[in-house]
Structures are given as structure tokens and as C-alpha cells.
Image (cartoon, rainbow, N blue to C red):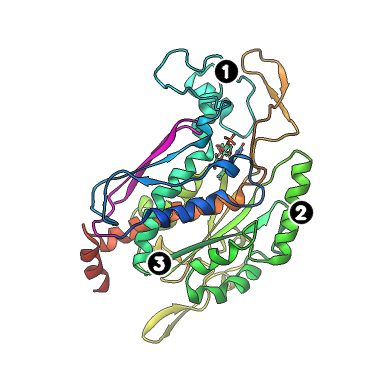
């Protein structure tokens, strides 16, 4: 089983990660990880931080001559922000008083982890809550999960995501219209979806919507507000039989939902037609089964590739919603947690709409869930051993 841990504060010296349980003999490169790290930094609506960070993960262990050894893979990504004078995080972590001249933050932003953080950890300054809850951490998460992504790709499993809605702008019929657009692309594998989406500054496959989404982001930025939206991730090449119905915590859809809801600012997830299926009746929701070319197939894929917690062999379709960014230039009401006085929210550098960047994060966390479901069925200690089991 692949596990990963990340450590690091948003403005601390570096992000650190350990990915453990990767079979031996998998070819992996820092360049392939760098590709997804660079994708995570791009997208219309991003804030100033992404313009100067140059995220690249360096392997510190577990890799030899471009292949995994089976040992834990440690990685680091430096934070350029740490070197800056306004870093707000001590330069020497164990030295008392270093950075104490920085003014304490006592005015929490609704929607961020500010108030819940100080209440839970009894901080007298919101800063440590900001630092660790920040989605800066997702840079290392993407790096850790990119290893699972390379594992899946080795077995022909591809992942690709795109944006289907930003605020009030999105596909009219988000299921049918998106299927028409994405369906023909899947014969080339799901990576063609992200490659095409990456050409759009908001990672949307539709040119007209791209323009409208950009305009909306410009409008909300000018107003000092923020935006979220909807996304979709598709996985092709996934074999049937991953996951199980025998117990709640073995259902593949349940595991995917946990990974998505564990990602900053994600407020909902659905598999296939999801919420929409609750509005329709049975005959037009369930996917009819046919037998063709010596195989069981489904005429449609409204269930999004999972039935009974088990993959069907159809493309996996995961969709979700990201809420608008909590930090906004135009303030809303809050309360100083020390003085208990009513206050306007304070502003600090922020994304306006991080959804185009977040797509890469959700693609990545799904990769590790799937790699583990794959390993559970076909697992072994080396890629060679897994190849034998898979080809059987
Ligand atoms: C890629 C990405 C970038 C984000 N950028 C910001 C940001 O610049 N400013 C901000 O206030 N929140 C940002 N967020 C959202 C916060 O990290 C998130 O709302 C906060 O950690 C509270 O967690 P919750 O929304 O899951 O409750 C971002 C989230 C993601 C996934
Ligand atoms: C640094 C990243 O995202 C950050 C996520 C984030 C938040 O509150 O989640 C707040 C901002 O941090 P800063 O105040 O340092 O600009 C974003 O830039 C990143 O994605 O690498």
C-alpha cells in the first residue's frame, strides 16, 4: 500500500514529503513530477505567490538510477517565499524570539482555518493556523501523488481533469454537454483531456466558456471578491474489479470521496451523474448491460465507472465543487478573537480563483487511491512481479 506524509508551513524553509510502499523497479523522474508541479502553478485567477515560486521536487531517497528501490521516497520543495523579508515565519525554527517582532494576527477570515485553528490549538496568533492549513501544502501532495500517477501510467491508466464551471458560468447541461465534448477524446486516453484543458487559461475545454470564465474572474477580482466552481476528473484504462462492496471502508467510491474532501476548499464530490441522478428516474439513470466482443459492457456510463464500490472497467468519472477563496479584498464581517470587537476581515496576498490550479491536486489525490486499489488486487514488491500478475 502506498502512503504519503507531507510536512511544512506555507512560508517555512521547505515542504517535505515521504511516499512509502511504492514497488521496486518503477521508472520515475523528477521531470515528470515537475510537469504536474508546474501545471499546479498555472491558471487564470492565481495570486502573486505563484509568479515567483519555481516548484521542483528533489528526490532524497528511495530512487536509484531513475528507478524506485522499494524504500521510502523522501522529497523536498523549497519555499522561495521563506527567503523574503515578509515571510512571517521564523528563519531559525528552534530559536526563541526569532520573528517575534511580527505582529500577531487576531482577526479571523470566515471560511479559512483561522478561528477553528486558534480555538482548537489555543494559539494566541492565527499565523500557525494559516501556515499549515494553506494550500501551499498541495505542492508536496502533488509531488507525492505524481509517483502513484507514474505507477498507473506504467499500466496504461491515465488521468485528466478540466473545469466545468466558474461561479455562474458553466455548461448548460453539465452532464450531457460535457459528455459530448469529452467522449471522443477518451479513445486517446484521459491525458488528452488535461493536455487539451491546459491550453485554456482556466482549464476549460470550451472556448466560449473559457472567455466568459475569464471575464467573470476579472469582474470579481475588481470587486475584491473571489470564486470557486465545478471540476471533472476522468480516468481511462482502469480494469474492472478494483474496490469492494464487502465493507464500507473498502468501497472505491468511498475512498475517492475521502481523498477529495481531504483537499482544501473542496465542498462536494460525486461519481458519474451523482446529484443529477437524484432528479431523474431509474430507466434513464442506470447503464444497460450488453455482451459484445466476448465481454460485458454498458451502453452508457452514468454511474461513472463504479457499481457496488467496484470499478466496472468503464472510464471513471469523478466530479466536485470548490468553494470561493476565503481571502477577499472587499471585507466581510468578523470578530477579533482577543478583543471580541466587530471587525472587517483583513486581506493578505491571495488567489482570486484557484480552481484551474486545484484541478491538478484532485487529479493527483485520485491517483494514489487508484494505485492502492490496483496494488490490493495485483500487488507485489516489484513492478516485474505486478506485471506478471496483471497480465494473468
Ligand atoms: C490550490 C488551492 C489554492 C488556494 N489558494 C488560496 C488562497 O490563495 N487564499 C485563500 O484564502 N484560500 C486558498 N485556498 C483555500 C484554502 O486553503 C482553504 O479554504 C482553507 O485551507 C480552509 O479549508 P476548507 O476550505 O477545506 O475548510 C486554496 C485552495 C487550493 C486547493
Ligand atoms: C502558496 C500556494 O498557495 C497559497 C494558498 C493559500 C491558502 O490560504 O490556501 C494562500 C496563498 O499563500 P500566500 O499568502 O503565501 O500567497 C496562496 O498563494 C501554493 O499553492 O503553492
Q: Is residue 339 above or below residue 378?
A: above
Q: Residue at x 44, y 78 (%)?
A: 297
Dot 2 beta carbon under 8 Å from ligand 1:
no
Please name the residue shown 42% across and 49% down the image: 143
> Looking at the figure, which quarter contains the C terminus?
bottom left
Q: Which callout, 1 or 3, points at the residue further toward the start of the chain?
A: 1
Return the residue at label 3. 157
**Where residue 288 appears, x then y in whole percent?**
50, 77
Q: Residues within 10 Å of mark 1 (few under 14, many from 20)?
A: few
Q: Which residues are magenta?
A: 1-26
Observer-side mark, 1 or 2, equals: 1
Q: Say which label, 1 or 2, has the lower sequence index.
A: 1
Residue 154 found in image quarter: bottom left
In the shown orientation, is residue 29 left or right of residue 44?
left
Estimate the x, y position of residue 117 in percent, counting from the top left: 52, 26
Q: Position of residue 283 (x, y in %)?
A: 57, 73
**Dot 2: few (<14), some (14–19), or many (≥20) neighbours within 10 Å?**
few
* CA–CA distance in space, label 2 to label 3: 35 Å
Q: CA–CA distance between discs 1 and 3?
A: 48 Å
**Foreground label between 2 and 3:** 2
Answer above or below: position of 89 versus 268. above
Provide the residue designation for mark 1.
Answer: 102
Residue 138 relative to residue 320: left or right: left
Q: Could you tell me if residue 243 is visible in this image? A: no
User: Looking at the image, is mark 2 or mark 3 earlier in the sequence?
Assistant: 3
If the picture is divided into quarters, which one holds ligand 2? top right
Residue at image position (71%, 64%) is: 172
Residue closer to the observer: 103 or 107: 103
Mark 2, residue position: 215
Amino acid at each position: 500500500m502506498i502512503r504519503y506524509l507531507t510536512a511544512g508551513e506555507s512560508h517555512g524553509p521547505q515542504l517535505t514529503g515521504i511516499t512509502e510502499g511504492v514497488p521496486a523497479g518503477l521508472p520515475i523522474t523528477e521531470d515528470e513530477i515537475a510537469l504536474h508541479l508546474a501545471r499546479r502553478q498555472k491558471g487564470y485567477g492565481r495570486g502573486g505567490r505563484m509568479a515567483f515560486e519555481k516548484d521542483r521536487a528533489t528526490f532524497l531517497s528511495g530512487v536509484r538510477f531513475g528507478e524506485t528501490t522499494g524504500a521510502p521516497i523522501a522529497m523536498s520543495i523549497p519555499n522561495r517565499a521563506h527567503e523574503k523579508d515578509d515571510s512571517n515565519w521564523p528563519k531559525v525554527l528552534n530559536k526563541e524570539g526569532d520573528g517575534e517582532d511580527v505582529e500577531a494576527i487576531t482577526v479571523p477570515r470566515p471560511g479559512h482555518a483561522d478561528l477553528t485553528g486558534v480555538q482548537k490549538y489555543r494559539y494566541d496568533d492565527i499565523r500557525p493556523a494559516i501556515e499549515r492549513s494553506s494550500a501551499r501544502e498541495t505542492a508536496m501532495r502533488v509531488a507525492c501523488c505524481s509517483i502513484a500517477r507514474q505507477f498507473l501510467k506504467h499500466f496504461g491508466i491515465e488521468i485528466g481533469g478540466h473545469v466545468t464551471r466558474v461561479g455562474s458560468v458553466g455548461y448548460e447541461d453539465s452532464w450531457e454537454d460535457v459528455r459530448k465534448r469529452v467522449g471522443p477524446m477518451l479513445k486517446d486516453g484521459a491525458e488528452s483531456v488535461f493536455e487539451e484543458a491546459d491550453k485554456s487559461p482556466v482549464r476549460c475545454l470550451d472556448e466560449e466558456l473559457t472567455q466568459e470564465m475569464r471575464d467573470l474572474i476579472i469582474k470579481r477580482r475588481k470587486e475584491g471578491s473571489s470564486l470557486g466552481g465545478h471540476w471533472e476528473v476522468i480516468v481511462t484504462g482502469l480494469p474492472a474489479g478494483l474496490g469492494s462492496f464487502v465493507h464500507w471502508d473498502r468501497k472505491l467510491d468511498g475512498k475517492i470521496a475521502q481523498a477529495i474532501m481531504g483537499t482544501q476548499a473542496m465542498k462536494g464530490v460525486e461519481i458519474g451523474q451523482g446529484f443529477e441522478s437524484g432528479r431523474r428516474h431509474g430507466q434513464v439513470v442506470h447503464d444497460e448491460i450488453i455482451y459484445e466482443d466476448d465481454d460485458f459492457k454498458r451502453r452508457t456510463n452514468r454511474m461513472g465507472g463504479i457499481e457496488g464500490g467496484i470499478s466496472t472497467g468503464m472510464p471513471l468519472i469523478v466530479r466536485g465543487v470548490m468553494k470561493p477563496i476565503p481571502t477577499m479584498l472587499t471585507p466581510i464581517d468578523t470578530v477579533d478573537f482577543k478583543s471580541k470587537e466587530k471587525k472587517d476581515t483583513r486581506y493578505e496576498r491571495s488567489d482570486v480563483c484557484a480552481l484551474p490550479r486545484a484541478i491538478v491536486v484532485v487529479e493527483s489525490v485520485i491517483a494514489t487511491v487508484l494505485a492502492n486499489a490496483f496494488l490490493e488486487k495485483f500487488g507485489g514488491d516489484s513492478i516485474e512481479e505486478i506485471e506478471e500478475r496483471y497480465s494473468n
